[in-house]
Image (cartoon, rainbow, N blue to C red):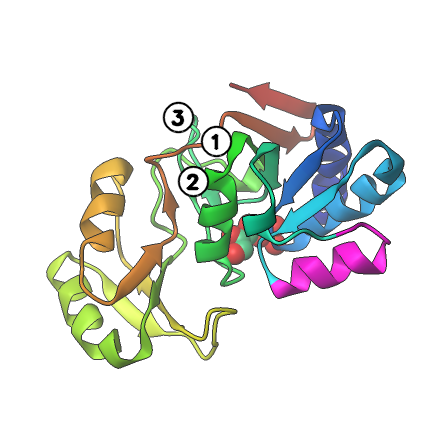
Amino acid sequence: MATQDELKQQVAAAAVSYVKGGIIGVGTGSTANFFIDELAKVKSKIDGAVASSEATAKRLKAHGIEVFDLNSVDGMEIYVDGADEVTEHLHMLKGGGGALTREKIVAACAKKFICIADASKLVPVMGKFPLPVEVIPMARSYVARELVKLGGQPKLRDFTTDNGNVILDVFGLQILNPVELEAKINQIVGVVTNGLFAARPANVLLLATAEGVKTYE
Ligand code: 5RP
């Protein structure tokens, strides 16, 4: 029986078949790290990458992959990233690593979002994993009160984002309509963004299972 890390490695290797050249958008987290290691093996095929976090930029550079500022590129064919939860509709809950805002921005600039995950991430309804919300520090108490009104229990994470903001992890949500909730939370003044990737879901989900990597699109 493969370990979770072996499954992450397998799905990262499978994602390389989507790498055709140009500039690749790269996510953050342990599964994305496996993908960076696989991308390094084909680095002569690509021009470079755009990173969704300082940690990802550091790992890409350590492999000798050029990292471009997002403002200096016109767009990307693909963005590859993991998820904390994903549904069969390819809606995702992300941000366990705290990089949700930059992930959403880089993903927005890519034609295709390729989500790579091990089978434990596929859920019928999202919300068991606490929903991360990036917040401007001075708005944290106000936003927390608004999130309670939406039925959640926000908890401040001991963490500062790459953008200098804080994260409220919202427990106790059963996310039956992710598109609606994503928009609702983003409308709270002081919220930078939340970890629901539903308005713009993944285009492809590569899911590593005991029976091999399955593709959903
Ligand atoms: C980071 C993320 C990650 O994609 C998510 O947390 C999954 O991480 P991992 O691949 O380590 O399970 O959104 O902000």
Amino acid of disc 3? His
Left or right, 17 with respect to 176, comes to right
Category of crowding for the residue at label 1, using alpha-carbon neighbours closer than 10 angstroms: few (below 14), some (14–19), many (at least 20):
many
Q: Depth check: 64 or 82 in front?
A: 64
**Image mark for residue 89:** 3
Q: Which mark is residue 92?
A: 2
| Secondary structure under the numbered disc 1 in the rendered image | loop
Classify mark 2: helix, strand or loop. Answer: strand
Check if mark 2's residue and mark 3's residue have beta carbons within 8 Å. no
Q: Are marks 2 and 1 in contact (CB under 8 Å)?
A: yes
The label shown at residue 202 is: 1
The quadrant of the image that shows the N terminus is: top right
Q: Residue at x 51, y 18 (%)?
A: 217
13 relative to 96 in the view: left or right = right
Residue 112 sits in quarter: top right
Dot 2: within a 10 Å radius of its alpha carbon, few (fewer than 14), some, or many (20 or more) residues?
Answer: many
